[in-house]
Image (cartoon, grey):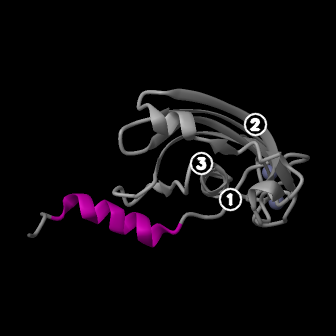
């Protein structure tokens, strides 16, 4: 049995305008993802529709990818699910530089899913949108407690410059 993300495109290629829905769940490893942000056993959900044109097959739909990482503010483990849409083109003989190559009559969605997942998994995640982060002075986790450190002093030389900038005439 073939992989659920390798689609028989015989019917699509025969008649332009033919549509086919592909819904599949597969692991990151099956798609060939090797990235610290996406665990090998993580389940990716793919729900796309294929539609054939005269010179290729358009793939439109959505993909969900669970990711893991370290919160950029509090440095604790963070995890979530990235959901994104795809709109890609497969061509037997690519004329579009961004098109994926359609080899024979088997359309392999895996390279597209892999590329999209790596592009859309967050590089600098947050554990939650309103994470308060660590105090830069004492290092306390502000999500769990507060400290009495003063806010870092503003540098007045820069403020003076900012003030000047508004008053000087623009010179071209
Ligand atoms: Zn955090
Ligand atoms: Zn502090």
- Measured in 3D between alpha carbons, the distance from the residue under mark 2 to the one under mark 3, in whole angstroms, is 14 Å
Q: Earlier in the sequence, mark 2 or mark 1?
A: 2
Q: How far apart are labels 2 and 1 at the CA level? A: 28 Å
Q: Mark 2 against mark 3, which lies toward the viewer?
A: 3
Q: Position of residue 43 (x, y in %)?
A: 83, 44
Q: Residue at x 78, y 47 (%)?
A: 2
Among numbered discs 2 and 3, the one appearing first in the sequence: 2
Q: Nearer the viewer, mark 2 or mark 1?
A: 2
Q: Which mark is residue 149?
A: none
Residue beneath label 3, please?
Answer: 107
* Secondary structure at numbered mark 3: strand
Verify whether residue 160 appears in magenta. yes
Specify the quarter for ligand 2: bottom right
**CB under 8 Å between callouts 1 and 3?**
no
* Residue underneath mark 1: 124
Residue behind mark 2: 24
Q: Residue at x 63, y 48 (%)?
A: 109
Q: Does the rendering let one see residue 111?
A: yes
The x, y position of residue 130, in whole percent, is: 72, 40
Residue at x-position 47% and y-position 41%: 57
Q: Regarding mark 1 in the picture, which secondary structure is present there?
A: loop
**The magenta stretch spans which residues?**
155-168
Q: Main secondary structure of the magenta part?
A: helix
């Amino acid at each position: 049995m073939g992989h659920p993300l390798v689609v028989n495109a015989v019917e699509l290629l025969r008649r332009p305008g033919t549509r086919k829905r592909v819904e599949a769940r597969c692991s990151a490893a099956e798609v060939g993802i090797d990235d610290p942000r996406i665990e090998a056993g993580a389940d990716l959900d793919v729900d796309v529709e294929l539609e054939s044109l005269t010179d290729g097959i358009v793939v439109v739909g959505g993909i969900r990818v669970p990711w893991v990482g370290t919160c950029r503010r509090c440095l604790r483990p963070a995890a979530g699910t990235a959901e994104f849409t795809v709109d890609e083109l497969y061509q037997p003989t690519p004329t579009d530089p961004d098109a994926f190559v359609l080899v024979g009559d088997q359309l392999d969605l895996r390279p597209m899913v892999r590329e999209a997942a790596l592009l859309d998994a967050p590089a600098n995640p947050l554990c939650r949108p309103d994470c308060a982060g660590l105090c830069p002075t004492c290092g306390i986790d502000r999500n769990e407690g507060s400290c009495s450190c003063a806010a870092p002093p503003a540098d007045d030389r820069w403020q003076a410059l900012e003030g000047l900038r508004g008053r000087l005439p623009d010179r071209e």
